[in-house]
Amino acid sequence: MADRVTGRFQTPAPPEMEILKVNDPVLTELLEPKLRLIYGYSSPLFLDKTLVGSGTFIAWNDQFGILTAHHVPHNPLDSSLRFNFSASSQQRLGLALVEFAHCFEFEMRNLSLVNIAAPVDSEDPGRGPDLAVIKLGNKAVVEAIAARKLFYRLDVRTFERLECSLRDDGIFVICGAAKECEQTGGPELGFTEVMTEALTTYYGGMVPPSGRRFQQDGYHYAELGVEYATHDGLPGTFGGVSGGGLWRIEVSANAQGRYTVSDPVLAGVAFYQTAVVDDQRKIRCHAGDAIYTEALNQLI
C-alpha cells in the first residue's frame, strides 16, 4: 500500500474536432489556461488510499461539497469500497490537491452525503440517473482545500450557466483520473512510496457523430465520443473517471482568424462508459440541468 497519493495534471493536445475542423497550435495554447482552471476545480477521490472515482469542488450559499456520481460512494460491485458516513466510521477520504507528493485525508464521519439521483436499475448502470454530492461541513477542511484548489459556485449566474451548458457548439472536456493510468514511485519528499494519479482532460464535440444528447426517465444526458483509432495514449478503460466534470468551452474566431476562448462552464458529470464499438466508446454524463436545477434545488 502506498504511503501517499499525489495528483498529476496532464493535457493531451486536442484532437481534430468535427466542430472546429482544425488542430491549431494557437488554439491549443489558448486552451491551456482554461484546462488549468478545470484542473483547479477537480480531484481524484480516494477511499483509504484506493482510487474510487473523481469529483468537482462546488459551493452554494455558505456551503461546500464535492459533486460526483452516485455510484462512487455507493459502489455496487465492491462493498468494501462503499463510503461509511456514520459516527463510528474509521474510513478516510483522500484528495489530490497539488502536483507533488503529499497527504490530504480527512475522516469520513465528519462528512455527509446528499443522494441527488440514484440509478433506477442496478442491472443497467448506464441507464442512470447517477448523481451525488459529498458535503464538506468542517471549516478547516474547506479552508485547506480552498488554499490549493477552487470551488465552482452553483449559485452564481445559474440560469446563464445552465443555458450555456446545454448548447452543442464549443469544445467539451471531461476531467477525471483513470485508474489504468495510476503509477507507483518514490521515495519522494519523505514518503517511501507514492501513488501518482493522472488527472487528465479528454476533449471532444457534442455535435454528432462526435457526441450526442438524449433524454431518458426524465433526465437529460450527454455523451462524448472517444476515438481509439486516431488517438494514442488513451486508457483502455475509463474506470476512475466516474464523477468527473463535463465542461464546455466556447470558441469563436473573428474575420482575421483570431480565436476567443471562454472560461469553462460546468456542463455535466460523467458516470458511465459504453463498450468499445468500431474503435470508439462513449463517456455518458448527466447534462447541465441535473446540476443547476436538480442538484442545486436539493442542496438549497
Image (spheres, helix red, strand yellow):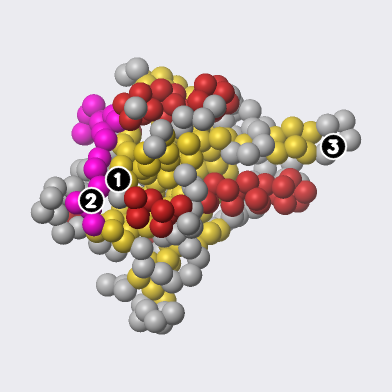
Q: Which residue is mark 1?
A: 137
Residue 20 seen anywhere in this rendered image of the structure: no
Position of 255 relative to 204 (above/below): above
Residue 103, placed above or below residue 139: below
Q: In the figure, is residue 106 to the left or right of 283?
A: left
Snapshot quadrant of residue 161: top right
Between 200 and 97, the one nearer to me in the picture: 97
Q: CA distance from mark 3 to mark 2?
A: 52 Å
Q: What is the secondary structure assignment of the residue under circle 1?
A: loop
Residue 4 drawn in magenta: no
Q: Residues within 10 Å of mark 2 (few under 14, many from 20)?
A: some
Which quarter of the image is occupied by the N terminus? bottom left
Q: Which residues are magenta?
A: 107-125
Residue beneath the point at 56% across and 30% down: 206
Mark 1 and mark 2: Cα distance apart in space: 7 Å
Q: Name which residue type carries label 2.
A: Asn
Residue 270: quadrant of the picture:
top left
Dot 2 corresponds to which residue? Answer: 110
Marks 3 and 1 sit apart, C-alpha to C-alpha, by 48 Å
Relative placement, left or right, of 279 versus 76 is right
Residue to which mark 3 is pinned: 257
Q: Point out the tag, 3 or 2, that comes first from the N-terminus.
A: 2
Q: Amino acid at mark 3?
A: Gly
Visible in this render: residue 109?
Answer: yes
